[in-house]
Image (spheres, rainbow, N blue to C red):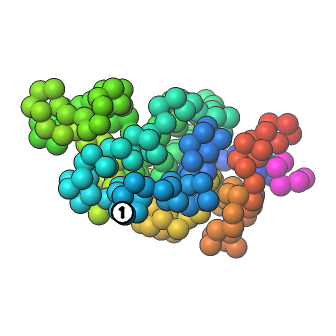
Amino acid sequence: MDKYQILKSIIKNSKHIVFFTGAGISVPSGIPDFRSADGIYNQKTKIKASPEEIISHHFFLENPEYFYEFYKTKMVYPTAKPNDAHIFIADLQKEKRISVVTQNIDGLHNEAGSKEVYELHGSIHRNRCVRCNKFFSLDDVMKQKGVPYCDKCQAIIKPEVVLYEEPLDEDIVSGAIKAISNCDTLIVIGTSLVVYPAAAYLRYFNGKYLVVINKEPTSYDHQCDLVFHEDVIEVVKKINEK
């Protein structure tokens, strides 16, 4: 068997699979990643602050106008749709238990139909007033020009995404670690595994098969049962052909 057949067999025979996904799974949907030449972290900004600083907690508080200008144009892609990889993962839930642990904030796993999704870094689709906690959709935020404000108390609206200097949600982290600890197969897709603490969660895996699908090598490659240095869409296509 070639490695695509092996992966298909692993998926077929697994009882509980966790897909651990990063920006690379959403690139085919038209959303740029973070660290490539065209990635978010290499985007030019109108001010001296780097992209990393702009999406920090203190910058959001001190410069909401610049924050939202960058956020709305560089981090939010409201027309993006789930691609074949998102749909492949969601469809597997019809046959077995599938958990998704994602570093992405785009919500595409949910839109594809996945049910057990742990969004470590939050979601662009959830937004709340910093004062009264009223909920706002992504559309509510995007239709306001510039900084969005609450129509109830006039305070600023903040996306429920984890900015630099902010902690991850403890309940989401706990659920993600539990899923990784209890699964028999862990498939990592589209992440360089250099973002901590999220990347450290792989050490909780005690299952049978560890698979990495990422265009570039990762520090975990030598520990894997299977490694694919290619686009996840191609891997999904080849699996489906077998």
Can I make out residue 176 in this image?
A: yes
Q: Residue 161 at x, y = what percent? A: 35, 47
Q: Which of these two is toward me, 199 or 59?
A: 59
Q: Residue 222 at x, y = what percent? A: 70, 73
- Which residue was labeled with disc 1? 49
Residue visible at 57% across and 48% down?
32
Q: Residue 83 at x, y = what percent? A: 64, 34
The amino acid type found where label 1 is placed reads: Ala
Q: Which of these two is toward me, 81 or 154?
A: 154
Work out whether 135 lies above or below 33: above
Work out whether 234 lies above or below 208: above
Horizontal placement of 154 versus 86: left or right? left
Residue visible at 18% across and 40% down?
156
Crowd class of label 1 (few under 14; some 14 to 19; many from 20; radius 10 Å): few
Q: Residue 6 at x, y = what percent? A: 81, 52
Horizontal placement of 151 versus 185: left or right? left
Instruction: Tell me where the magenta segment starts and ends, as one range.
Output: 1-5
